[in-house]
Structure formats: C-alpha cells, structure tokens
Image (spheres, rainbow, N blue to C red):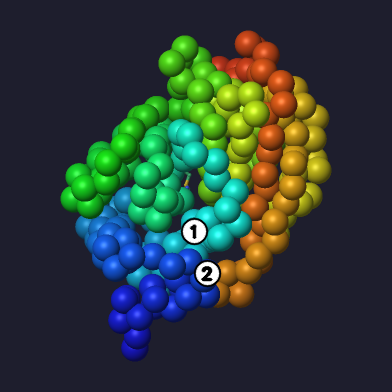
Amino acid sequence: MRTEEQRLKEVMAQLALPIEPEQEQLLLKYIHMVVEGTSRQRLVGPRDSGEIIYKHIFDSLYPVTLNIFSSGELLDLGTGAGLPGIPLKIVLSGQKVFLMDANRRKIIFLKKVCRELQLDQMNFLAGRAEEWARHPEYRERFQTVVCRAVADTAILAELALPLVKLGGEVFLYKGPRGVNEAAAAKHALRLCGGEVNRIYHYQLPTGEKRTLVCLSKIENTPDIYPRKPGKPAKKPLS
Ligand code: SAH
C-alpha cells in the first residue's frame, strides 16, 4: 500500500502544483489531524487518508491550478473540518483566510490545527453566515468566498453574496449538478446582487465529476438579505 506521502505526491503531480517540502509536511500533518479528529473526536469529516487525499485535498486545491484567486481576504463559508480553507491556506501561504462554521466544535478543532501547523493570518468565525452577514465588520467585506458541500446554489446565493464586496467573487465547489443548480438559481443570485460568471468542469482522481461555479458580485446586496437564520435553507429564494 502506498504511504500518505506517496499519495500526496501523486495528487500534487496530477494537479501540477509545485509545492515546497515544508508545505507538503503541513498538508500531511493536516491530513493526520483530520483522520484522528474524525475517529476520536467524532467530528464529521473524511474517514481515511486515501479518501481525504484523492478526493478532498485534490478538490480543494484544484482552483489554485486555474489561478483564479485574487489577493485579498478569503472566506471559507461552512468550512467543516477545514475544507477547502486549510489546504488553500497551506498552498497560498501569504493569503489571509477566514474560516466560518456554525458548529463551534469544528472551529475549536480548526484553531488547534492552525496552532499546531503554525499557520499565520488565520481568523475564525464561529456562527451562522446569516448572522455574520449582519455584522457591520463583515458585511460585503470579502474579496473571495469559497464554499464546498454546504447547500444548494439558491441558498448559498443568500448566504455568501452578502459577505462579498462589490467586484469580488464566490467559488462554489459542486458536483455534476452544479450547472443545473446555477441555472435554477439565476433569479436568487440577481436578488442578492450576483450572477454566474463562468463554470469550470473537472474530474477527481477517483473519477467523480466536479464543477466549480464562479459568481461575480455585481451589485450591493439589498438589506433584506440574508433573511433570519434558517430561513434561506427552509424557503430558498426563487
Ligand atoms: N466544507 C466542508 C464541510 C461541509 S459540511 C467540506 O467540504 O467538507 C457543511 C458545513 O457547513 C457544516 O460544518 C455546517 O456546520 C456548516 N454550515 C451549514 N450551514 C451554515 C450556515 N448557515 N452558516 C455557517 N455554517 C454553516
């Protein structure tokens, strides 16, 4: 069986992303911590290192190969066990990153990860996007928001766009349904000041098809959005 190090090297070669040995070590440490955290602390996350490397690390880092992230603050909304935010931070080392999750246990885990990996310029937002988007310090603040496996596009329109600054972008990591979801969410996106800018198609080493839906923030989000916590998911804008 291949070691974690060999698997990671293989994935980085497939992505054609050159990284320093220190960055590779940090990715390996993170992979260990997620696998341990999933079994010991019963955090929901990838269960074994093969799955995390071939599926989640590859997926998280794929957009870096497209060179689409502007410098400026990046928010990972609904980061869970730190995906894609932690792998992105390790590879884009100068980037200022904010990790947001409604689940406080996950934020506690992520603080521990960042401490042990000595990642700088990391910020933690425990709580729901609906609430943070009402906070004057965070509303329309971010240049980039990334979001993976959190909700349907119509729901994410209302959760993510209020947090993005005018001219900024949202990147939704999606499965093959991404294209249809994006089309169905057109009106919801417009209501919140966004539109679909472009969609990338790619495949994971596991063979799964993925899409990356890129949204642009073209108008300020009206004050009525997001609606109160839970409402965007219960009654998505249409
Ligand atoms: N992005 C991670 C985790 C996906 S699970 C990955 O790709 O593996 C979805 C996460 O989104 C959960 O941790 C959940 O707590 C968080 N979440 C769901 N709705 C949210 C909201 N409204 N605000 C903030 N976090 C939310």
Query: Against 77, is 18 above or below?
Result: below
Are the residues flagged by discs 2 and 1 in contact, CB closer than 8 Å?
yes
Going by the numbered disc 2, the residue's amino acid type is Leu
Taking 29 as reference, is 190 left or right?
right
Query: Against 98, is 32 above or below?
Result: below
- In primary-sequence order, the first of circles 2 and 1 is 2
> Which is nearer the eye, 30 or 144?
144
Residue position marked by numbered label 2 in the rendering: 15
Taking 14 as reference, is 47 left or right?
left
Taking 117 as reference, is 11 left or right?
right
Taking 185 as reference, is 118 left or right?
left
- The residue depicted at 50 percent of the width and 15 percent of the height is 134
Residue 82, position as x, y percentages in the image: 38, 48
Residue position marked by numbered label 1 in the rendering: 61
Mark 2 lies within 8 Å of ligand 1 (Cβ measured) = no
The C terminus sits in image quarter: top right
